[in-house]
Amino acid sequence: MCYMLIGGKNVFEKGLMMGGHNDDLNGYEAASLELYPHRIREAGESIALPTGPVIPTPGETARCIALKTFRGDLAGDTIAINEHNVCLMGGENLLMDRNERAAAADPLVENGVAGGVRFVALMQSRTARECVERIGRYYTEYGNKFPCAVGVFDTEEAWYIEGGGGTTWLAVRVPDDCYLIQSNGYRINEVDWDDTENVLHSEGLREFVIEKGLWNPAEGPFNWARTFGRRFLEDPSTYYYNSRRIWSGLRLLSPSAGFGPDEEEYPTFVKPDQPITREKIMELLRDCNGDNAFRAFTEQGVENAVRPIGVPHCIHSAVAELSCDRPVELGGVLWSCLGSPLAAPYLPHHFGISRIAPEMEEGSDSFSKTSAFWNFRELMNLASADFYQHLPELSKEWSALEDRALAFKPAVEKQAAEAWESDPEKAAEILTAWAESLDYEALKTADRLRGALNRKIAGSLYRRFAKGSLEW
């Protein structure tokens, strides 16, 4: 159960396209970084998906930098940038929100494709539109085993695609002056069938929904989300499960719009009050409703009634950025967080780096002292002894590290850009050395913080049984 932000080219800092994503799985599903080389593939080569389909590959596939889970790049949770300046922003589970009428009309395909097909599409695509078109074609050709949503953007456009069921899908282009927030529920509302520049869908979708009795044109415009989703709204216990996370994002990015926390449906696209920065996206992905009545962590413990955006069991988070006026090697950056952003930092990794620190590459579902993920996960586990007290301490440390990274980033990129013209390998080494220095500083800081938390937690254990103070 995840969270995502994407937007059009005019909503972010000037010259950038960006996105943000939290991957909220079981807390032990380790995350890691990986570089995938540009490959010339042999004739007849194919990719076998875990769900069964075998997809033929083209003669070439693109170089990628990816943040993924221990299950691999074909598990469906991958956030990645490819050499053509196209970014894939993870995935969003829609299965729980799909209503029973849609499920009966368009059943899932047991041996169809699932989330991993998105990375297969990214490796072959030169634009965001091409990527969502490929994803849609795979849904159509092989059938869909698991309905999900995903955002894809390049330096010009952001696209968003949702799977309706085993055969149906719909994709929309995010307007240049708007952003979209996703939190595990169907988000595409009214659709203009004639807008072929900004709307893509499975062949015959209009006829399908009419024939299956899912939509009656006489009753008003076609609303994709109401047609295929809204199951969460049928149960009082899950009524606000997704919607208040949507509201949390809207209150941070568009406070002047005045959205309330109890609305049944929020617009698909919304304009921000101010240009959205990297720092704002990081704040968004860490948000725990600390400024309102739905605060997740209090002195009394954890309030479970409202799910916040930032959760302890998040296994990776990212802010991805693409520069509109620089090569992807210099302007494509994956701010990677290996763990929950509540207890781990966002660390910049440029597309042009030549290697990744071994600790950032290591990750499995078994604890490891050398894995960066498990170092940050252990810190999160310790903080769980008292979220209210410990999380602000961790946030202060990581914010300081991120601020230093943001402050030095322009100078590092300037140095790399100057080297790029005559010596691309030197430019790559500059970016690699900087990424590694921050990675190791983060790991050293995590080790210090774990020591401090262990001591503090140990020092408070006496309160369980002792009477009075233990002062000598």
Image (cartoon, rainbow, N blue to C red):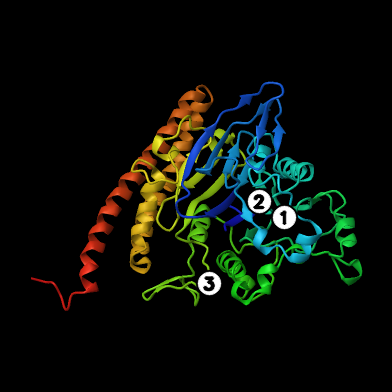
Residue at 62% x, 69% y: name it: 243
Where on the picture, by quarter, is residue 58?
A: top right
Name the residue type under label 3: Val
In the orientation shown, which residue stands out farthest toward the front? 110
* Mark earlier in primary sequence (1, 3): 1
How far separated are the C-alphas under marks 1 and 3? 30 Å
**Circle 2 is placed at which residue position?**
150
Residue at 48% x, 61% y: name it: 311
Whole-percent x, y for residue 170 in the image = 77, 53
**Circle 1 is placed at which residue position?**
175
Whole-percent x, y for residue 113 in the image = 69, 44
Label 1: state its secondary structure.
Answer: loop
* Mark 2 crowd level (few <14, some 14–19, many ≥20, 10 Å Cα): many
Where on the picture, by quarter, is residue 188?
A: bottom right
Closer to us: mark 2 or mark 1? 2
Residue at 38% x, 46% y: name it: 367
Name the residue type under label 2: Val
Label 2: state its secondary structure.
Answer: strand
* Mark earlier in primary sequence (2, 1): 2
* Mark 3 crowd level (few <14, some 14–19, many ≥20, 10 Å Cα): some
Whole-percent x, y for residue 206 in the image = 87, 57
Q: Identify which residue, 460 or 109, lies in the foreground.
A: 109
Q: Is residue 447 above or below residue 42?
A: below
- Whether residue 364 sits left or right of residue 78 in the image: it is left
- Give residue 225's mark: none
